[in-house]
Image: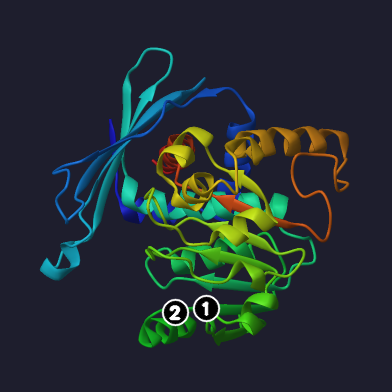
Amino acid sequence: MKIIDREQVAASLSYQSLLPALLQSFAGQFTMPRRQVFELAPGDGSHNAFALLPAWDEEVIGVKSFTYFPNNASEGYDSLYSKIMLFDRRHGVPLALVDGSSVTLWRTSAVSALTADMLARPDARHLVLFGTGKLASYMIKAHLSVRDYNKVTIIGRSADKVRALLAELQPQRPDIHWCAGQSDEATLASADTISCATGSPTPLFDGNWLSPGTHVDLIGNHHAHCRECDSTSIVRSRVFVDSKTNVLNEAGELLIPISEGVFDEGQICAELAELCAARVKADGQHEHALGSTPGRQSEAEITLFKSVGTALSDLVAANLVYKLTARVD
């Protein structure tokens, strides 16, 4: 059994290889039971948790286990630790133990970008990112791999972290106009794609600020009582999710509007698997006209994607790393 660390993950993966792998896998046959998140001490203010995310397809079986200790930073530890076990689908033989923390960064940003490739307008030029954590640079690079953005605005609570992120990314893409921004009407109204990767418990912007044609991407929140966007954003959008089962169990972005009576789960347009299956079919028929798939139907509509993370995306990314490292060996 191979042991694959984060350095090998980073050396193996690229969005050019990962996005097509995710597309094909989500469009194919797979099984993905609901993820299980266990609060270690229910009612305790720390919210320390342990989670299991199983999935399998025709090639491999995988399970990601992770711990989430949100207050770890004060003691010098990471807040999340994760490992992914891979087993051969035919005989159940253990194949690899892969660093799940690094895979999570890659697969989360890749799913976000893959969905944006199906929902954001083809002519999208201004990307706004909320968040300056470990995911931030991955999210930006992933989105840059699917659209020709000429402006990127980064919004964060820490001005120092925003400056550090800009200093990291500007030299890599000097052709793009990079700037620090604020969550205000002018900034949000000028955005073509808004990606949110924060730990904010409350909405980051006013949904009335969204312009027609905007795509909104929400990946930061996993709590039923929290949300990165308000109910107005949900009501104004055609809503897509990575997994109905998981989102309707965990995501306040939808659960709160449902409790308010302004949104119904039946209004969810499609899951990621349905979007991918439609894209693969359309690719085969060379048909990408608006309205030909469950994705974007018009230039003017607002689209919104809510993701809480899926075991299949972990499986696909980890298996891709396993196969690529096996070639090197």
Density class for disc 1 (Cα within 10 Å; few <14, some 14-19, many ≥20) is many
Where residue 118 appears, x then y in whole percent? 71, 49
- Residue 165 bears which disc, if any? 2
Amino acid on which the number 1 mark rests in the picture: Ile
Q: Nearer the viewer, residue 172 or 151?
A: 151
Q: Is residue 299 left or right of residue 51?
A: right
Instruction: Give yes or no for contact between labels 2 and 1 (Cβ–Cβ under 8 Å).
Output: yes
- Residue 145 bears which disc, if any? none
Q: Earlier in the sequence, mark 2 or mark 1?
A: 1
Density class for disc 2 (Cα within 10 Å; few <14, some 14-19, many ≥20) is some
Residue identifier under label 1? 154
Q: How many dots with numbers?
A: 2
Report the residue at 20% width, 54% height from top.
Answer: 69
Where residue 261 appears, x then y in whole percent? 56, 46
Q: Is residue 298 above or below residue 52?
A: below
Report the residue at 60% width, 46% height from top.
Answer: 263
Q: Is residue 178 left or right of residue 192?
A: left
Mark 2 secondary-structure assignment: helix
| Residue depth check, mark 2 versus mark 1: number of the one nearer the observer | 1
Q: Of all residues shown, which one is farthest toward the front?
A: 261
Q: Is residue 320 visible in the rendered structure shown here?
A: no
Where residue 294 appears, x then y in whole percent? 75, 39
Measure the alpha-carbon separation of dots 2 and 1.
Answer: 8 Å
Where residue 245 appears, x then y in whole percent? 48, 33
Q: Nearer the viewer, residue 329 or 46?
A: 46
Q: Nearer the viewer, residue 181 or 317?
A: 181
Q: Nearer the viewer, residue 217 or 328?
A: 217
Q: Is residue 168 above or below residue 322?
A: below
Quarter location, residue 199: bottom left
Q: Is residue 270 visible in the rendered structure shown here?
A: yes
Amino acid on which the number 2 mark rests in the picture: Leu
Mark 1 secondary-structure assignment: strand
